[in-house]
């Protein structure tokens, strides 16, 4: 995997083959960050990376200067790898939590500008992550939840649905914690 932009642009990171992960491809990651770059100043965001795996997205946000990045993964090997790699790269704003993402999102008291979730494609009930994020108010106003998923899932009927993008076999669904003003503007525009 490669860091695409920021202070460690071009840096290659090799994760142990023993980790049970499916890292987001460089092409889809670059496309994702091109979208986010139009809406966020990365040096002002607080990020949550759920099902962090190798830390691929964590490093990308940290390299671009995110204020803080919390990486959550329930596999000890993944959590240890992210912790070591973040240390080597000098990412003091990264904190790693070994936890189940479903449980974490039910009990977390912090709010985030961006939450990225990349659960295993075959994992059942991934929609519960979306429910937990919105029921427990984990997004700041205008904050985004980005779900990476297979084509088997469709979240377009969710009230906070914003858009869906597909890059090869990778699907991203964007859900936004709209403020009341945004909702009123969209209603007036007939969106």
Image: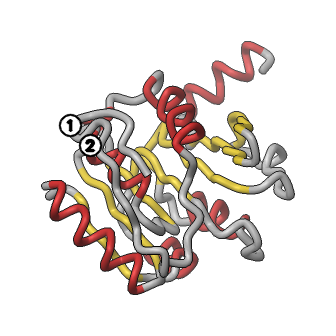
Mark 2 secondary-structure assignment: helix
Seen as rendered, the residue at the extreme top is: 189
Nearest the camera: 120 or 101?
120
Q: Toward which corner of the image does residue 15 lie, by quadrant?
A: bottom left
Q: Residues within 10 Å of mark 2 (few under 14, many from 20)?
A: many
- Relative to residue 44, is residue 130 depicted above or below? below
Q: Residues within 10 Å of mark 1 (few under 14, many from 20)?
A: some
Please state the horizontal and vertical placement of residue 96, each as a whole percent of the image: 30, 71
Marks 1/2 in contact by CB < 8 Å: the verdict is yes
- Relative to residue 178, is residue 13 depicted above or below? below
- Relative to residue 33, is residue 11 depicted above or below? below
What residue sits 41% from the left and 45% below the top? 113
Mark 1 secondary-structure assignment: loop
Q: Toward which corner of the image does residue 88 lie, by quadrant?
A: bottom left
Cα–Cα gap, marks 1 and 2: 5 Å
Closer to the chain start, of discs 1 and 2, is: 1
Nearest the camera: 112 or 120?
120
Question: On the rendered structure, is 92 left or right of 140?
Answer: left
Q: How many marks?
A: 2
Residue carrying label 1: 7
What residue sits 43% from the left and 46% below the top? 140
Residue carrying label 2: 63
Q: Toward which corner of the image does residue 165 lie, by quadrant?
A: top right
The C terminus sits in image quarter: top right
What residue sits 46% from the left and 65% below the top? 52
Label disc, if present, on residue 145 of the rendered structure = none
Please state the horizontal and vertical placement of residue 169, each as a whole percent of the image: 75, 48
What residue sits 83% from the left and 52% below the top? 151
- Relative to residue 186, is residue 112 depicted above or below? below
Please state the horizontal and vertical placement of residue 149, each as a whole percent of the image: 71, 56
């Amino acid at each position: 995997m490669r860091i695409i932009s920021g202070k460690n642009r071009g840096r290659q990171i090799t994760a142990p083959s023993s980790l049970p992960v499916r890292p987001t491809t460089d092409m889809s990651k670059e496309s994702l960050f091109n979208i986010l770059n139009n809406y966020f100043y990365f040096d002002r965001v607080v990020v949550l990376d759920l099902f962090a795996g190798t830390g691929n997205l964590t490093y990308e946000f940290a390299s671009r200067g995110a204020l803080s990045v919390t990486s959550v993964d329930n596999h000890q090997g993944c959590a240890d790898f992210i912790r070591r790699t973040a240390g080597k790269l000098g990412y003091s704003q990264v904190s790693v939590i070994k936890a189940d993402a479903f449980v974490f999102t039910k009990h977390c008291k912090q709010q985030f500008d961006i939450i990225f979730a990349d659960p295993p494609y075959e994992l059942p009930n991934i929609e519960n992550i979306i429910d937990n994020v919105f029921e427990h108010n984990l997004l700041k106003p205008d904050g985004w939840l980005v779900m990476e998923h297979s084509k088997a899932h469709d979240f377009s009927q969710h009230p906070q649905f914003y858009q869906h993008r597909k890059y090869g076999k990778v699907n991203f669904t964007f859900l936004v914690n709209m403020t009341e003003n945004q909702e009123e503007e969209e209603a007036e525009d007939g969106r």
